[in-house]
Image (cartoon, helix red, strand yellow):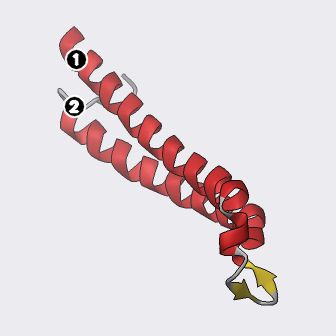
């Protein structure tokens, strides 16, 4: 893989990481801390939605973001692949 393609691949990877980590931060910090009073107006199973986001929602969101990252990087690998690797090489 040429140097330019490696840099483009790395930029793509960093862009994906930045966006996904920002989403996780927004869900965990924003919904679990900043907007907890507003979200607690909605009740799920006897608990406020803000409590749910702080305790469970950010974890579920993180797992979904991991799956999204795997899917995105598989697409990026196919896009930037210059040639197929032979087994054992």
Which residue corresponds to mark 2?
A: 80
Crowd class of label 2 (few under 14; some 14 to 19; many from 20; radius 10 Å): few
In the picture, the quarter occupied by the N terminus is top left
Would residue 33 be visible to someone looking at this image?
yes
Corner quadrant of residue 14: top left
Identified at 18% across, 28% down, the residue is 83
C-alpha span from label 2 to label 1: 8 Å
Please report whichever mark, 2 or 1, sits nearer to the chain's N-terminal start: 1
Marking on residue 1: 1
Q: Eyeballing the image, is 13 above or below 74?
A: above
Task: Report the side of 22 relative to 44 (left or right).
Answer: left
> Pointers 2 and 1 in contact (CB under 8 A)?
yes
- Helix, strand or loop at disc 1? loop
Expressed as whole percent of the image width and height from the top left, the position of residue 62 reads 60, 55
| Disc 1 packing (10 Å; few <14; some 14–19; many ≥20) | few
Where is residue 39? Give x, y as percent.
Answer: 66, 73
């Amino acid at each position: 893989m040429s140097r330019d393609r490696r840099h483009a691949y790395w930029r793509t990877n960093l862009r994906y990481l930045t966006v996904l980590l920002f989403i996780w931060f927004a869900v965990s910090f924003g919904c679990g801390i900043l907007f907890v009073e507003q979200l607690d107006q909605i009740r799920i199973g006897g608990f406020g939605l803000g409590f749910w986001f702080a305790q469970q929602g950010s974890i579920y969101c993180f797992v979904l973001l991991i799956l999204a990252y795997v899917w995105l990087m598989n697409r990026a690998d196919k896009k930037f692949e210059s040639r197929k690797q032979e087994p054992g090489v």
